[in-house]
Image: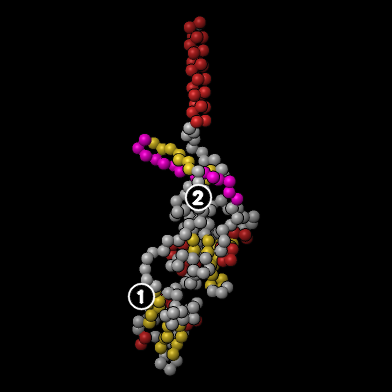
Amino acid sequence: MKVEFKANKAEMLRSHIEVIREAFKQAVAPDRVTVEYPRERKKYPPNFRGIILFDPEKCISCFRCAQICPANAIQMTFYEKAWPGIDYTKCIFCHFCVESCPTGALKSTKIHDVAFATMEEMKLRAVQLMKPPEVFREDKVTVEYLIDDKGWKLVRKPEIDELVVEAVLPAGRRKISVCVDPESCLGCRICVELCPSDAIAVDRKANKLKIDAKKCSGCGICVRNCPMRVLELREVS
């Protein structure tokens, strides 16, 4: 009985020492998994799909964002031009709209922690998309999970992560609409009515299209809606 009692006492002593050792270790070099948000913020990659911002100066009213949206979350509203609004009650954050925007008018952000008071407030107009939502930040440290052959670890850096990501556009020349088969043109004026830049007119005497290359933004609306498929987008020098 005395031997068993001594063995239990020694085991308890070892357990206490192990707990104290682990406490000192975590105090000096913590290896915890938890990110202490909001004092710390996990560092997301540039392609993180968060709240979307809108730059009206770059928008050419091409409607591509609205047409490609699989959730029908984007509606175009006419201000100076046709500008997109986003209904976040429908948005699935696929960012097809951002990726399809030819001018970078729609930009991704790493902002995901947004609260709305009502469902109606989640339906943002274009003018509401022009500036980021007000973000109260306490973070001064970014955290990244790094995994290698030896295992994983958390890397903490004393920095503030930029939440707005500038769009990177593919290199390419400017495109404008060109009538490639004027003889097949019906003179229906659909392209004239739809052009957001007023770049297209119809010469009634010759029954031919006139496209002002300086005004044409290359949005492609006329190309997509031409019933005779006589319009194309072509690069210009």
Q: Position of residue 177 (x, y in %)?
A: 40, 78
- Reading the image, the residue beneath label 1 is 237
Given the current orientation, which residue lies at the most extreme top position? 2
Q: Where is residue 222 in the image (x, y as percent from the top left)?
A: 44, 78
Residue depicted at x 50% and y 43%: 158
Instruction: State the separation of the CA atoms marked 2 and 1.
Output: 39 Å
Residue depicted at x 51% and y 38%: 34
Tell me if I can see residue 97 in this picture. Answer: no
Residue 190 covered by magenta stretch? no
**Residue 141 sits above or below residue 200 on the image:** above
Q: Residues within 10 Å of mark 2 (few under 14, many from 20)?
A: some
Given the current orientation, which residue lies at the most extreme bottom position? 205
The C terminus, quarter of image: bottom left
Q: Element type at marker 2? A: loop
**Residue 213 sits above or below residue 13 on the image:** below
Magenta range: 136-150
The type of residue carrying mark 1 is Ser
Query: Of label 2 and label 1, which has the lower sequence position?
Result: 2
Q: Element type at marker 1? A: loop
Q: How crowded is mark 1: few (under 14 residues within 10 Å), some or many (20 or more)?
A: few
- Reading the image, the residue beneath label 2 is 161
In the depicted view, which residue is nearer to us: 107 or 140?
A: 140
